Image (tube, helix red, strand yellow):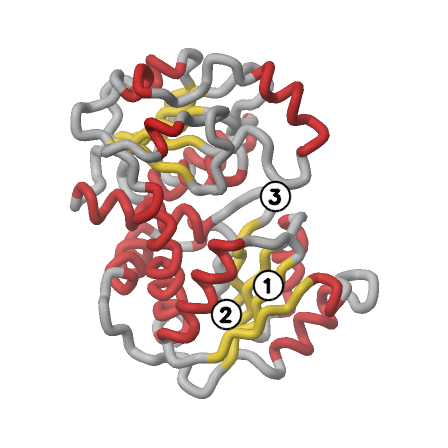
């Protein structure tokens, strides 16, 4: 049984195949007559809409399930919920607080489990990011993506995806907000040696894509004021974008805190691809599910 808990659960060749499937305008309806349980401990606009529409476009029926409907580890254990859902559905997607939750779901091993976000990783976002850059540049090998900001779950999955795609990865974070040694060891398994660079200007220099994310993620609201102080100088503005390649694009996984991690002129400017990137969440999900249901389990 194959599960996708992190993007490097795919090999490089499998990643290419998923992105190929994501680009197909008329995918095979591999979920006809089947359902997919979409479990949300954390709410989301893009994840819910992209996953539901991907399932529909593959001929299936998505079922949105909120945390209070099932009570993971309060009303029922994670394992019991997973076994129950596996009796109804061809696959389970879960957007959770703790990565161990999706690991426990996958350990039940009855149907494929897709991590729609955890505190550790965001493989669905990384797939959409790679698809966006692939549609922009074609072959991604040798291209450079520069990430500015908190080395969070989005950054970790993006770095792993970049490694699988043969890209270069630069990251610049304030002191105390960078990758851990364990993160770096994990990324290096893809044969990528990420460049850790102190100054955002130096990280962005020569990049083909510049990426940032909110400084304060869901669940970190109490740290917001401290983080705004710590991230001073890390706002992606037109001056910073000027250090990138002339044809470089700007990416953000959204939602954006406008004026904090990026300015309006960058978010809404000619280099921005944030709306294509958001739309690609659906296409990337469709490609992954096509592969996971129709090819990976054979």
In the displayed orientation, state which residue is furthest to the bottom. 33
- Give the percent coordinates (x, y) of residue 23: 24, 61
Q: Label 1: which residue?
A: 106
Q: Is residue 141 above or below residue 232?
A: below
Q: Residues within 10 Å of mark 3 (few under 14, many from 20)?
A: some
Disc 1 and disc 2: Cα gap in Å? Answer: 9 Å
Mark nearer the N terminus (1 vs 2): 2
Q: Quadrant of residue 85?
A: bottom right
Q: Secondary structure at mark 2?
A: loop
Rendered location of residue 63, percent (x, y): 57, 74
How far separated are the C-alphas under marks 1 and 3?
Answer: 16 Å
Q: Residue at x 55, y 28 (%)?
A: 215
Near mark 2 (Cα within 10 A), the count class, few <14, some 14-19 or many ≥20, is few
Counting from the top left corner in percent of width and height, residue 183 is at: 52, 33
| 8 horizontally vs 180: left or right | left
Disc 1, disc 2: CB below 8 Å?
yes
Say which of 84 and 261 sits in front: 261
Q: Earlier in the sequence, mark 2 or mark 3?
A: 2
- Measured as percent of width and height from the top left, residue 182 is found at 56, 32
Label 2 belongs to which residue?
Answer: 1
Label whose residue precedes the other's in the sequence (1 or 3): 1
- Res. 295 image quadrant: bottom left
Q: Is residue 40 left or right of residue 296?
A: right
Which residue is label 3 attached to?
Answer: 119
Which callout, 2 or 3, points to the residue nearer the camera? 3
Question: Element at badge 3?
Answer: loop
Mark 1 residue crowding within 10 angstroms, few (<14) / some (14–19) / many (20+): many
């Amino acid at each position: 049984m194959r599960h996708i808990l992190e993007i490097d659960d795919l090999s490089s060749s499998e990643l290419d195949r998923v992105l190929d499937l994501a680009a197909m305008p008329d995918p095979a309806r591999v979920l006809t007559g089947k359902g997919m349980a979409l479990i949300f401990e954390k709410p989301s606009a893009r994840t819910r809409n992209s996953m539901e529409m991907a399932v529909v476009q593959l001929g299936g029926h998505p079922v949105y399930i909120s945390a209070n409907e099932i009570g993971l580890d309060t009303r029922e254990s994670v394992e019991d919920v997973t076994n129950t859902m596996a009796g109804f559905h061809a696959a389970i997607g879960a957007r959770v607080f703790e990565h161990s939750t999706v690991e426990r779901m996958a350990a039940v091993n009855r149907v494929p489990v897709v991590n729609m976000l955890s505190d550790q990783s965001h493989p669905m976002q990384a797939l959409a990011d790679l698809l966006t850059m692939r549609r922009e540049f074609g072959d991604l090998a040798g291209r450079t993506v520069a990430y500015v900001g908190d080395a969070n779950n989005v950054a970790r999955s993006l770095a792993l995806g970049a490694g699988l795609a043969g890209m270069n990865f630069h990251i610049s974070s304030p002191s105390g907000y960078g990758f851990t040694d364990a993160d770096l060891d994990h990324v290096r398994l893809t044969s990528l040696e990420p460049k850790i660079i102190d100054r955002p200007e130096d990280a962005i220099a020569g990049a083909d894509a510049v990426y940032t994310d909110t400084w304060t993620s869901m669940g970190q609201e109490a740290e917001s004021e401290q983080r705004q102080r710590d991230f001073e100088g890390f706002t992606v503005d037109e001056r910073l974008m000027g250090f990138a390649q002339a044809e470089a694009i700007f990416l953000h996984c959204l939602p954006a805190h406008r004026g904090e991690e990026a300015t309006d002129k960058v978010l809404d400017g000619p280099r921005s691809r944030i709306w294509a990137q958001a739309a690609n969440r659906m296409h990337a999900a469709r490609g992954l599910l096509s592969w996971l249901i129709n090819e990976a389990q054979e």
